[in-house]
Image: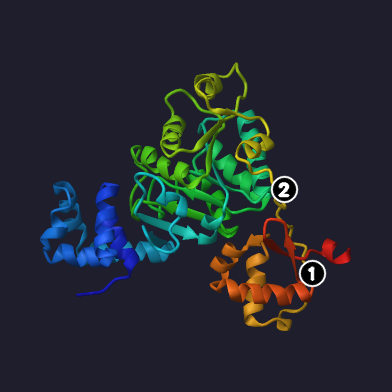
Amino acid sequence: MKTYEERVYAAWLSSPMLPPEILKKLLEQYRTAEAVYHAFHSGEKDCLDQIPGLCLNTLRKNGNMSVLDFYQSLMERHQIQVLLYGSKNFPENLFHISDPPCILFYQGTLSALCHSRKISFVGSRRASYKGLRATKKLAQELSERRICVVSGLARGIDAASHEGCLLGGSPTIAVLGCGLDNIYPRENAGLRQQILDSGGVILSEFAPGEKPFAWHFPIRNRIISGLGDALVVMEARKNSGSLITVQWALDQGKDVFAYPGDPEMPSYHEGSHQLLREGARFFVRVDHILEDLKWLDNLPQVAQNTTSLPDETAFSEEERRLIDALRPGPLGMDELCFHTGYSAGQIMGLVSLLQIRGILEALPGKLYQLKTSDSQRK
């Protein structure tokens, strides 16, 4: 029997959209998607008894070599990787929601998931010019404070929030309602590539090949709200998908912030203003959000790439890896360990040496950054 990578078996296991609680039990019992595959195809009763009838049929249909080869080719072509529930790099925030996605496919850089502070954005696909401008400005200001923005890469508010985050210098996280091989919507193809090029990550719980069906989006919204520490609603219409995300956020115990906008516009008074009447947090400036979340701790802004360093040959391989991790901006100890793969003890040794040499500097909040040209001149 041909053997495939774990990500291929994960695509097979994701294909019938098993309820999260069943998928979680299977992965906890068998540890890997490959082990589930072999238990399934050997007819192991304990495995088969957990899977609903319609899902059994889908797994049988998609378990042959031609379909697995199809998954493998898609994932290789689109550089799609996989995270399983309980694995080392699985987003910590998602462990704490009631129905976590147990298989996440991703493109890009997982370090974006390690940001200690994340804000989720939702809003209308048909947002007003003022709403888009306000969203972009807010996302940029959060990003400049090392806060990662999470959204859905849809038209309107989603796209504006990702664009603003990129302008602020922090990576952004996009959660899709289709397989990662699908470029949806088409007009955001360039933005999607910018997210990947800037160290961000694109996630989906839907297997490669899955189309953007309408029912996928309310489901994926629990991941958008789950990844963030709070949810910002910029411009929401009555009975919109944004309000579904609000309900997910409330069920997850997250703070919900609503932007007041223009009271004469239906996109505000039908949705956002009703949220404010029902108890959502009011804000008009970024400091309002930071104050309510108790995040007003003077985090340094993202350092611009004006660092002047000696020639690379002056550093060891370990030092170069640490320096490369810090090029986008300040990082804490946990993030440095994640980016480099080194232990905290190794990091401390390297940091000390590079500080003595004037390459790094320590910042409030136990952060480190490369010394910029300005700071070197002081």
Q: Amino acid at mark 2?
A: Asn
Quadrant housing the N terminus: bottom left
Residue 215 percent across, percent down from the top left: 33, 38
Q: Nearer the viewer, mark 1 or mark 2?
A: 2
- 58 relative to 239 in the view: left or right: left
Q: Which mark is residue 298?
A: 2
Q: Which residue is at the front of the view, 227 or 79?
A: 227
How dense is the environment of label 2, judged by Cα within 10 Å: few (below 14), some, or many (20 and up)? few
Pointer 1: what residue? Answer: 308
Q: Position of residue 151 (x, y in %)?
A: 51, 43
Of the numbered discs 1 and 2, the one sitting upstream in the chain is 2
Whether residue 270 is visible to the viewer of this picture, yes or no, is yes
User: Going 24% across and 67% down the picture, which residue do you hit?
Assistant: 35
Q: Position of residue 255 (x, y in %)?
A: 52, 36
Q: Secondary structure at mark 1?
A: loop
Q: Is residue 16 in view? A: no
Q: How is the image coloured?
A: rainbow
In the image, which disc is placed on residue 243? none
| Element assignment for label 2 | loop
Give the farthest residue toward the top: 264
Q: Quadrant of residue 161?
A: top right
